[in-house]
Image (tube, coloured by chain):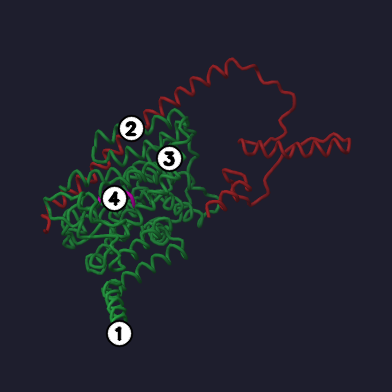
Chain colours: A green, B red
Amino acid sequence: MEMIDLFIQTLAELAETSGFASLGWQNVVMMLISFVFMYLAIKKGYEPLLLLPIAFGMLLTNLPSTGMYHPELWNIDSGHELDFGRILHEGGLLDFLYIGVKLQIYPALIFLGIGCMTDFAPLIANPKSFLLGAAAQAGIFLTFLGAALLGFNANEAGSIAIIGGADGPTSIYVSSKLLSTGGYQVEVGTIALAAYTYMALVPLIQPPIMRKLTTRKERLIRMEQLRTVSKTEKILFPIAVTIIIALLVPSAAPLVGMLMLGNLFKESGCVDRLTKTAQNELMNIITIFLGISVGATTVAEKVISFAFFKVIILGVIAFSVGTAAGLIFGKIMCAVTKGKVNPLIGSAGVSAVPMAARQSQMVGVEEDPTNFLLMHAMGPNVAGVIGSAVAAGVLLSIIPH
Amino acid sequence: MQMEWSYVFAVVISGLVLVFVALILLILAVSVMGKIFTANDKKAAVPEKTTAPAPVREMPAPVETATDDDETEIAAVIAAAVAAIAEESGRALRVKSIRPAGGQRRSSRGQWAAAAARESIQ
């Protein structure tokens, strides 16, 4: 009899401590949302390298009682410092991985890998492309205005606005700095989720805007072949960009510096092993850590909220305004150069590389299958990466955090 | 805490201006760098031209309409094919002109290269 009582008591204790006992409806909703993102990543192929770990992190964090992520360790009051000793003592696996996000290590290392994979030759051959990369950043700053209209404070507005840069690591970098203390309506995870979702939706968001804002005659414009860029120019470019940007906007130095270091690795041709590691193994490891830990921050109370709904709306506005601003500047350049610039390359100024440049090519090909705009669009596209990193630095230097 | 509108506009305007200033500085730097290197390339190319011996015209140019590298390459391939046939048959053949079929648009690259590029982008 005593044995049966003990057995029942053990079962009751197990039931009480199991996840089922503390499973709320919000957890279930969040798990369903994570399934949607997994479906988009696996079946639809939308940014799977990041959406899949983010979605799985979301699933893990919303399974109650796992102890893998503790939001209370990260939500500190304004004016207080994070207690890393407590995090290391009481934290779970995802808390430890999240330290790399909170200290802005992962975005900078991702930029190192991106630098190794980026060819800046189209931009060096046609430096005016920088203007298109700058124009597309208008989406960031106009969305800051929109976020202020919807009642967000400066730190939240800055974090939402950076989604318009269409650059995941930059969004994480800025939001983890601006939202470093607790008490905000939005969280790094929700910003990253919105940013990567919109980057994945580039082929759906951009083409209608591109067709609407350009005429058929403009879309048919053929651009002159770009000049060949020498190896010395390619080596000097990352050094010059680092010096100029770090002197002008020091807070952009971590992102731009790492991007350019990666590019110098590639162009120098003397550190093949480092280049391969930075663009393959290191990048893949960081992507896993970044994805799963950012996904872990998407706890129910931050996502199932009106604030997140507003982030989603502002995110699509940011992206669309950035695309439109690039196109309009492309039209201005077309008029100034008397039809030598196809305005379609302007939309590639948002830094979603290379999806945005590919859209310029695809929309151009719809009108003339023999018109190849891809290399011309890669100029503004890589300029957009530098532009959004500069915009991030500007936001960080203006907004107190 | 709601932001003051003067602050919001200050962020928007100073943000946009700073991004443009930074990237315009980069345009200037890259343009100067490009000018220096293209000038150097031209300087290096000039002596080569003057010292190079006059080209020996062993064979007459087979194509009258060839104007760029791509077309010259195509013409050379066609001429080589004709020469091969001529050798087999023991007759002397001469390519007088090569003209594209009517109705074709001029493309900056060959049709095969264009098709391959289209396929890889899609």
Provide the residue designation for mark 3.
Answer: A116
Residue at position x 35%, y 41% in the image: A130
Residue at position x 24%, y 60% in the image: A70
Front: mark 4 or 3:
4
Q: Amino acid at mark 3?
A: Cys
Quarter-wise, where is residue A255 in the image? top left
Compute the Cα span from label 4 to label 1. Answer: 54 Å
Given residues A91 and A245, the one toward you in this image is: A91
Residue A89 lies, in percent from the top left, at: 23, 53
Compute the Cα span from label 3 to label 2. Answer: 24 Å
Residue A266 lies, in percent from the top left, at: 45, 36
Q: Is circle 1 on the same chain as circle 2?
A: no
The disc numbered 4 marks a residue on which chain? A
Near mark 2 (Cα within 10 A), the count class, few <14, some 14-19 or many ≥20, is few
Front: mark 1 or 2:
1
The reply to whether the C-beta atoms of the residues labelled 3 and 1 are less than 8 Å apart is: no
Give, as a single range, the part of the protein colored magenta.
A168-174
- Label located before the other in sequence (3 or 1): 1
Tell me: A311 left or right of B30: left
Near mark 4 (Cα within 10 A), the count class, few <14, some 14-19 or many ≥20, is many
Mark linked to residue A1: 1
Name the secondary structure under disc 2.
helix
Mark linked to residue B28: 2
**In magenta segment, residue A173:** yes
Residue A180 lies, in percent from the top left, at: 20, 52
Compute the Cα span from label 4 to label 2. Answer: 35 Å
Given residues A266 and A207, the one toward you in this image is: A266
